[in-house]
Image: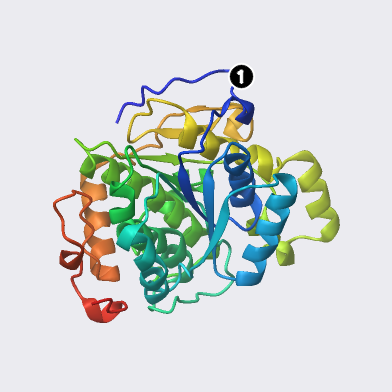
């Protein structure tokens, strides 16, 4: 899709307007890019729901944000994106009556040394980064539809462009390599966003994807066994930006007016590693209608969730295989 959204060469989070009428849910909001995204949204008045697996880290994040912005409106949502049952349970109260204006699918795992699986038997990286967010977005669709003009922002990465990120053998059942699985999950984030944008056509809701450039976050710290401490320290000083700067594309996509569904955003600096955010070219072939339809159908098959964004879809019609997830009847 063509992205016609405006791009200021000097955009920064200071340009974010009043968000006091907005409710934002951020996965992985307890650390790194997610925490910095939450910080800016809360500072500008949004009611922010920080979603993550561990209550203690979520509470610590809330305390940090309230120290930074006294009076910030913050809540936490304990959810494990590697468990369809956890996603359904956490989402149910929100889907039943809350409104969500902004969903930022930010959380992720990377570079898992050995092939591991989620609670539902999916390869952990794709299962968390893509299938978990696919399921969460589906479960929260009633809350998103209540908003006047909801946005779904999904955070991908430059790894999406790697040749190893092709979506065949999606769950790495034939061959597993840690960073290949990560590249697949990040490509899936973009392909999912493109297909979601097509399915939202005619609705006020929009779906966009971003990549944050390069920053030292908890994802890179999980790779510490591959590098000496000295090399990591040097890398952080010379090559990688801060999580605060890496949050800019997410914030830009979440807050600029008149955004076009299907847009893709990243840093404007050299090699798109850092800099002010702007619309960037969609990576090659990731707007494919065939690939989008295939990934959507495969994601429905694997999760057991029929994900129909159209408002005429009833919540009880979304399940293909209720036995795979928590029965909420």
Horizontally, residue 243 falls left or right of residue 280, namely right
Picture quadrant where residue 11 is located: top right
Horizontally, residue 93 falls left or right of residue 324, namely right
| Total labels drawn | 1
The answer to whether residue 168 shows anywhere in this view is no
Q: Residue at x 15, y 65 (%)?
A: 317
Q: Position of residue 184 (x, y in %)?
A: 43, 56
* Secondary element at tag 1: loop
Front residue of this view, candidates 99 and 194: 99
Residue lying at the far front of the rendered structure: 71
Location of the C terminus (image quadrant)? bottom left
Q: For mark 1, what is the residue?
A: 10
Front residue of this view, candidates 323 and 70: 70
Front residue of this view, candidates 282 and 14: 14
Q: Position of residue 256 (x, y in %)?
A: 47, 28
Picture quadrant where residue 190 is located: top left
Q: Residue at x 67, y 53 (%)?
A: 217
């Amino acid at each position: 899709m063509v992205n016609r959204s405006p791009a200021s060469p000097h955009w920064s989070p200071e340009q974010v307007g009043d968000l006091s009428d907005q409710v934002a849910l951020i996965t992985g909001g307890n650390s790194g890019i997610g925490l910095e995204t939450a910080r800016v949204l809360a500072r500008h008045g949004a009611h922010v729901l920080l979603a993550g697996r561990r209550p203690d880290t979520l509470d610590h994040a809330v305390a940090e944000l309230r120290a930074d912005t006294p009076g910030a409106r913050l809540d936490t949502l304990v959810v494990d994106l590697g468990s369809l049952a956890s996603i359904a349970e956490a989402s149910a109260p929100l889907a039943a009556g809350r409104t969500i204006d902004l969903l930022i699918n930010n959380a992720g795992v990377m570079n898992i040394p050995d092939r591991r699986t989620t609670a539902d038997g999916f390869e952990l990286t794709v299962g968390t980064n893509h299938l978990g967010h696919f399921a969460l977005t589906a479960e929260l669709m009633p809350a998103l539809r209540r908003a006047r003009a909801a946005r779904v922002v999904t955070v991908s990465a430059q790894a999406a462009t790697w040749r190893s990120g092709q979506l065949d053998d999606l769950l790495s059942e034939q061959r597993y390599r840690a960073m290949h699985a990560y590249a697949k999950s990040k490509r899936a984030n973009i392909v999912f966003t493109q297909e979601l944008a097509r399915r939202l056509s005619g609705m006020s809701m929009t779906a966009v994807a971003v990549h944050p450039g390069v920053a030292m976050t908890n994802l890179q710290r999980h790779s510490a066994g591959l590098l000496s401490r000295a090399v990591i320290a040097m890398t952080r000083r010379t090559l990688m930006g801060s999580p605060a700067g890496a949050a800019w594309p997410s914030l830009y996509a979440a807050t600029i007016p008149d955004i076009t569904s299907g847009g893709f955003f990243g840093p404007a600096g050299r090699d798109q590693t850092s800099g002010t955010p702007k619309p960037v070219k969609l990576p090659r072939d990731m707007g494919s209608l065939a690939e989008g339809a295939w990934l959507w159908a495969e994601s429905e098959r694997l999760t057991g969730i029929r994900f129909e964004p159209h408002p005429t879809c009833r919540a009880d019609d979304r399940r293909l295989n209720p036995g795979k997830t928590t029965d909420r009847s």
